[in-house]
Amino acid sequence: MWAVIKIEKGKLATIKNEFFSKLGNDVKFYIPKIKLNKLCKTKVLTKESYLLGDYLLCFHKDLSKNSVIAYLKYCKGLKYFLGNFQSSQNEIERFISKCQENEDKDGYIKQTFFNLKNNYKFEFISGPFTNLIFSILYENKFHVEALMGKYKLTVSKQKNLFRPV
């Protein structure tokens, strides 16, 4: 069963070690990540970020038992288990499938993961326009034609990531 877990920042290795020691080696973790490119003066800095922030998905067959959840509740680095994950197994599995379908060869989420709709507001999260807001005028497989203020621009979907605002 999949569980949604909130962890303390920087404690991913600790939480993995705790779960492996308490549940054994058949624990699986899924943490979707994205690669962010930011322009800093003349250099492009690449940063890895987790799509879910400080949440992660954990699978183990015994996570359906309340006694196991109570046993794991006080692990180092764990803030809490998200409630009602038992009733949301289908949604969690669909989310994981969608993430895995939209990963590149290095395991990073591609822009195709995000649903794009014309005339909605979006924010660039990587590339030279990071943190700027725009609306989509036209979209095809490779490029997006956008309106940012009074300027019209065309950006590559492969090199830039953006999310709905």
Image (tube, rainbow, N blue to C red):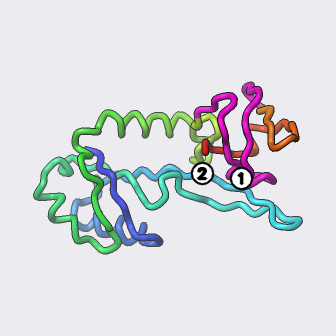
Mark 2 or 1: in front is 1
- What is the number of the mark on residue 34? 2
Q: Quadrant of the C terminus?
A: top right
Q: Quadrant of residue 103?
A: top right
* Residue type highlighted by circle 2: Ile
Tell me if label 2 and label 1 are in contact, CB under 8 Å.
yes
Span of residues in magenta: 115-142
Where is residue 131 drawn, in percent x and y? 71, 55
Q: Secondary structure at mark 1?
A: loop
Q: CA distance from mark 2 to mark 1?
A: 10 Å
Q: Residue furthest front?
A: 150
Crowdedness near tag 2: few (<14), some (14–19) or many (≥20) residues, C-alpha within 10 Å: many
Specify the principal SS of the magenta part: loop
Does 127 appear above or below 46? above
Judged left or right of residue 113, residue 62 is left
Where is residue 144 drawn, in percent x and y? 77, 33
Q: Secondary structure at mark 2?
A: strand
Question: Would you say residue 15 sits in the magenta stretch?
Answer: no
- What is the number of the mark on residue 126? 1
Where is residue 8 drawn, in percent x and y? 40, 70
